[in-house]
Image: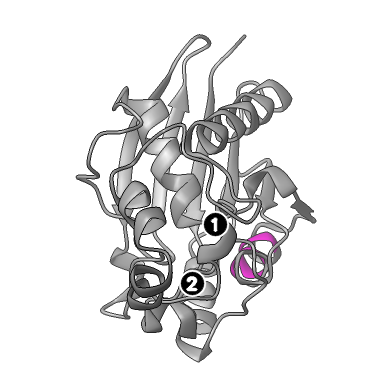
């Protein structure tokens, strides 16, 4: 299989990002700052040689991807495999609320227990990691020798970095997951590698909170 480059973009900021509230697969829209971040990101792709633009089908990712697809002159392809992790009972709650109501769940989530499936239908880290790797391999198989954009979420990008860098799934995170950041990964025909990560130079100081 020939090489391929994937430019992963994290969605713009939402009110729930600012509130420290778990979003997961709840369909939250961008706030006005997030819309501005999406427009700034889109302008980077005017006349760029991008073969396709993919997005999670959740609104905050789709709203971020639309200006990119428009600038690149491409139809947007929605892909459920790029959705955020399903956080089960954590979704819709702040960290303090989860710690109060589900202290054991919160502790195991913080410990990055790979096999722990979050109560309420949530995914384990192992399940999410496998889903993300399947999606990455599907993208490079569909676009040999090309560059594509994939707009997704913090939890997905956490897995992307680990897959491309070889960082263990249960290791503490030592890298940024910034709103509307560009994160470039290369497939050489057999393995992934990180080309660049957490690029937010195009945002010129706009806020880029971490998504729980």
The quarter of the picture where residue 206 lies is: bottom left
- Label 1 belongs to which residue? 87
Residue 187 numbered tag: none
Q: Residue at x 59, y 56 (%)?
A: 47
Name the outermost residue toward the bottom: 32
Residue 12 numbered tag: 2
* Left or right of 81, for residue 17: left
Mark nearest the camera among 2 and 1 is: 1
Q: Is residue 136 magenta?
A: no
Relative vertical location of residue 39 with respect to residue 142 in this rendering, above or below: below
The quarter of the picture where residue 97 lies is: bottom left
Depth check: give the residue in front, 159 or 35: 159
Residue range in magenta is: 64-69
Q: Residue at x 31, y 53 (%)?
A: 107
Depth check: give the residue in front, 49 or 61: 61
Mark yes or no: residue 46 visible: no
Q: Secondary structure at mark 1?
A: loop
Q: Residue at x 67, y 50 (%)?
A: 53
Estimate the x, y position of residue 193 in percent, counting from the top left.
Answer: 37, 25
Q: Residue at x 32, y 22 (%)?
A: 166
């Amino acid at each position: 299989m020939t090489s391929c480059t994937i430019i992963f973009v994290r969605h713009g900021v939402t009110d729930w990002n600012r509130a420290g509230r778990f979003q997961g697969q709840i369909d939250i829209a961008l706030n006005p700052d997030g819309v501005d971040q999406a427009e700034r990101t889109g302008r980077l792709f005017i006349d760029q040689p991008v073969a396709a633009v993919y997005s999670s089908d959740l609104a905050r990712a789709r709203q971020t991807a639309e200006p990119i697809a428009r600038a690149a002159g491409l139809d947007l392809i929605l892909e459920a495999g790029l959705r955020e992790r399903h956080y089960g009972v954590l979704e819709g709650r702040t960290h303090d609320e989860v710690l109060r109501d589900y202290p054991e769940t919160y502790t195991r989530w913080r410990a990055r227990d790979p096999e722990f499936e979050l109560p309420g239908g949530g995914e384990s880290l192992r399940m999410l990691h496998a889903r993300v790797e399947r999606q990455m391999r599907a993208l490079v198989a569909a676009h040999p020798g090309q560059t594509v954009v994939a707009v997704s979420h913090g939890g997905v990008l956490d897995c992307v970095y680990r897959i491309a860098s070889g960082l263990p799934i249960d290791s503490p995170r030592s890298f940024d997951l910034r709103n509307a950041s560009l994160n470039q990964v290369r497939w050489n025909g057999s393995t992934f590698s990180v080309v660049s990560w957490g690029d937010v130079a195009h945002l010129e100081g706009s806020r880029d909170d971490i998504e729980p």
